[in-house]
Structures are given as structure tokens and as C-alpha cells.
Amino acid sequence: MKTPIVIIAIMLCFNVLSQAQTTPNRGKELKEQAQNSLSQKDYIKARYLFKKAYEVFAAREDYPQAIECGIKANGFYIRENFYKEGFELCRSMDQLVWAGEQKTKKTLYDLRFLITKERLQMYIALKNPAQAKLQLDKLEETAKLAKNDSINEDLLYTKTNYYYTFGLNTQGDACFRKLILQYKEKKNYELLGKERVNTEAPQMPPNKMFLISGNNSGTGILQNIMDANGTGLICETEADTIASAISSEYGHWSDTLRKAFDHDRLSYNRRTDQEYREVKRIFLAVLLSGTPAQVRALIPSAENGLFSRQLFYYMHGIYTWADQFACGEIDLDEIFRSIGRDWQLKLDILKEHGIHTLRLTDEQKKEFNALFSDLFFRSDIANGNEMRSFIARLAVNICRIMSTIAMLRVLEIPQPYQLKSSDRYAPVPDKEIPTDNVKDGIITRWDITITPEDFKAVLGLVKPLYRHATHILSFLPSSEIPHRANADRDAFFDALGDEFTRTQLTEQATAMGIKPNTALSWLRRLVKKGLFVMKEKGTYVRARVCVC
């Protein structure tokens, strides 16, 4: 009976030895498979394989290889906004490094630096400057203790990125100049000769600008937006600056402006350097002023797509001279700078607390739908389908304005992010946030509401913005119908309200400087189209639309 036992023991020992020999190869195989998946842009599979390789190397106590694979897996978590999983992986890597330090009896500064840097990247992606600064301070402390030139150089790059991301351009420029100085102190890259093969070329950090020039090429505007992580503002006092740039040989970025409305993904591929760049979402704002002729150059027709994505405000020309010295010594530039600084403080607080989502009540949703349904019906009668897209996107813009107003109201509440706030309009954690995260104070998404007064005020912008847009539409070439709605006519009937008499109509026309016969002609035309109906002799009411 002893022989089988010995044989079984030998077989078990052989099996263990066999597994011990194949485990290191398994980690290497997983890593290579992950690299292949990455080259094929199969990011989900690459993330999974890097995570598995991390686990294998961790079990083997191969700390550098494990952390390398863990960092790469975490990069995909950031890419897909899986921050909870990313933070959990960082905690696991921290524990692994700590165990390694206990076993080797030395501090693994280089690995600690990489994990802290990964946390910093996540807080930067979450737009959380307070937590990001804590991680940056830890990086600096680690770099000082490490006394490693490579780590110090990496720290400078990281600090430059941090400062530019959060708009601290002065500090970012200082770090960038220090990087350039370091390269000059080493050697001029172009004079290295054959050694250039073994030397990594210095990489310019992204040129992050919040204000983006409208006088730009197609690739230039893409690069500006991508360098700024998809955020920017184009502000031009002459609309034809952009119109000329778009129509130039190297322009044609009207599609970029259209994509910006829906925060679409942007990408480009350069064949020369085999450079591919993309940004998942863009947040680009455009503020322009110009004459009607400049509008025609920028927006050739209502079907262009740019028309429906803009909000317009038409200003009358100067009819009388105004006193040019009445403002006294008011420094308008300082007033706007003060407003900007105040807004920056508010924006920092909002970023620090993550994503805010506006939630309307059922009554507010009903009122919103009723207003836009009525406007859609009226516009269809007056303009055919030329204004349909504008009204649909006007609804989006109105929701964005409501969100902004609601967030500003949140900041008026004392300590708004306390979970037990007594204010009914204080933000509350999103329902999808896990209970454990709420208890630990890890809340990255908040639900906010808008007060009835603010809701009414923002809805009050809908009809004026619609009238201004129809006035701008009259400057553009007609794509469908020969006669368009008159903005003065819309304003006239809005002033009359939902029900009026023939006498009230003529009195209102006289008050607004409109000929009574013109007003009566408008009324007959709109009655014929079904926009108004005669309730009784001499009395008219606006047709209503059912919102189902």
C-alpha cells in the first residue's frame, strides 16, 4: 500500500513544480495578448487581460511587472469612466507594494509614484481640484524621497498637466519653462548625432487654451480643442472672422461647430506622422456678433445645421445720438474681470462635487411640453419645416439654461452639499450612487431641482428667442417657402394674448406703429391657416394643441 502513496506524492510534487514553471510564462502571455488587443483597439479585452496579468504577476511577487499591468488596466477604467473600479484597483496595488516593501525591507518609491499618479489622473478626469492637489502633494513628497531624475522629470510633466487642466496657466508656464531648461542643460537633441537613436525626443506638452481663435484651420481647431481636453470658448466680435476661416482652403470646420452642440466625439488621423488623436466629448461655446450680411456668409441656409444650433439676438441700429461721457469713470474691464473671478470660484466648487443633473417635476415637464408643442404647431403653419430643427434645439438650450440657473441657486444655499440640509432645493445624491459610497462621502453625481420662479423666468425666454430667430431666418435664402413669418407680426400677436377682439387688434397695431389694415391682413391669413379661430363675431382665440 506504500507504493501508490509514494507515486501519488511524486505526481503531486511534479504537478506543483509544473505549475510553478508555467506561472511566469502565463503572466507574460497575458501581457502580450493584452498588447495585441490594444493594437487592434479592442479596449475591453485589453483591460481584462492587463488585469489578469496584474493578478498573475502579483501572485508571483513580481512587483514592477504587476504594477505596470495594473496601471495599464486602470487607464482603461479611466477611459470608460469606471472610477469606482479604478480606485479599487489602486487600493489593491497599494497593498501589493506595501507587502513588497515588508518583504524586501526597502521602500519602492518608483511604484508608489506610479500609483499616486494614477489616482491624480482620475481626480483630474473627475474635475476634482481639491483631491487632485492632495495627490499632487503626495507625488512631490515621493519624488523628494526617491531622489531620482526620471521621477522628478515625470513629476514636472504631471504638474504642468495639472496646472493647465485647472486653468492655473502661470504655474503651468513656469513648469513648462523648467522642462525646457532641463533639456537645454542635458544637450541639444539635434546635436546628438547617432545617439539620437537611443535618446527619446523631447515632447511638447499640450498647448491648453480656454480662449480659442476663430481665425483657425480645420486641423488647428481640432488640436486646440483636444489639447484643452475638449473644452473651449470662441469669442469673435466679427462673425466673418469665422466665416472666412471656414471657407478657406484649410478651413471647413463647420462640422466641428455642429458636433459641439451635442458634445460629440472629435478625432483626426495624420498620415505623415501616423498620429491618431481623439477626445470623447467636447464642450465648446461660441459667442459672435456681426451684421446680417455676415450671418449669410456664416450660415448659407437654414438647412446648413448651424442655424438651428444657435441662439440669436437681433439689435436695432443706432437711431439717435447717445451721450458718450455719461458713464463717468466706470472701469468696464474690471467689472467683467470681477464677474469672471466670481464665476471661476463657483465653477471650482461645482467641479469639486462632480456631475449635477437637473430633475424637473411632473408639472414642470407638462408645462414645458405644452409650450413647445404650441410653438411647434404655430411655426409649422407660418414657416413650414424650416424652423422645426431650431425649435427642437431651442428646447435643449432652454434646459441647459435651466441647469445653469439651478446650479447657481445651489451655491446660494449655506453648505449645500450637507446630506441633511433643510433646504428643499439642496442637491441630493444620485439614486444610482451605492449606499456605502454615500456613507463614505464618495459622491460624484448629484440631482438638483429648479425653483418655480426660475422655471417660469427661463420659459419666458422661449418666445422672444423664437422671434429673434425668425427675424434672422428672413436674411437667409429660402429653402422651401416663398413667404416667411415676420418677427414683428409674431411680437404683435403675442402682445394681444390668447383672446382678443377686432377693436383691441387695431388699437394694439396703432400702439406698435403698425398700420391697422396690415394687422387685419395678418389676422385673415392666420385664421385661414388655422392658427386663430373666431369664437364669436369680432372675437378671436388662439388655436390650442393637445400634448399627449
Image (tube, rainbow, N blue to C red):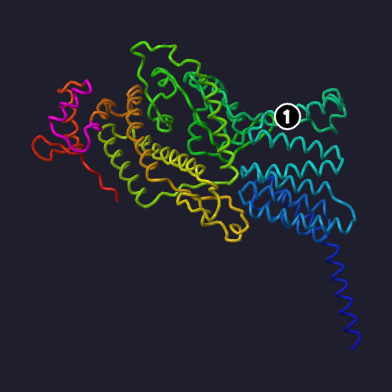
> Compared to 321, does 453 lie above or below?
below
Give left or right: position of 384 versus 121: left
- Is 495 a magenta residue? yes
Q: Is residue 167 left or right of residue 141?
A: left
Question: Residue at (85%, 67%) from the top-left corner?
Answer: 18
The extreme left residue here reads: 537
- Position of residue 133 in the picture relative to residue 256 (left or right): right
In the displayed structure, 35 sits above or below 260; it is below
Instruction: Depth check: give the residue in front, 99 or 59.
Output: 99
97 in the magenta segment: no
Total labels drawn:
1
Which corner quadrant holds the N terminus? Answer: bottom right
Find disc 1 in the rendering and name its residue: 204
Along the line of sight, the residue nearer the viewer: 57 or 371: 371
Hey, which quadrant is residue 482 in on the image? top left
In the rendering, at what x and y percent does residue 53 appear? 75, 56
Dividing the picture into quadrants, the one containing residue 399 is top left
- Residue at screen point 82% across, 51% down: 64
- Predominant secondary structure, magenta span: helix
Q: Residue at x 43, y 14 (%)?
A: 326
Q: Nearer the viewer, residue 526 or 217?
A: 526
Specify the amino acid type for callout 1: Met
Residue 431 in percent (x, y) is at: 51, 57
Which x, y percent locates residue 74?
69, 50
Task: Write the start and end of the magenta stretch as one range.
Answer: 493-513
Q: Is residue 482 above or below residue 424?
A: above
Q: Is residue 344 left or right of residue 104?
A: left
Badge 1 crowding class, 10 Å Cα cut-off, few under 14, some 14 to 19, many 20 or more, is few
Q: State the SS at label 1.
A: loop
Q: Position of residue 524 (x, y in %)?
A: 15, 30
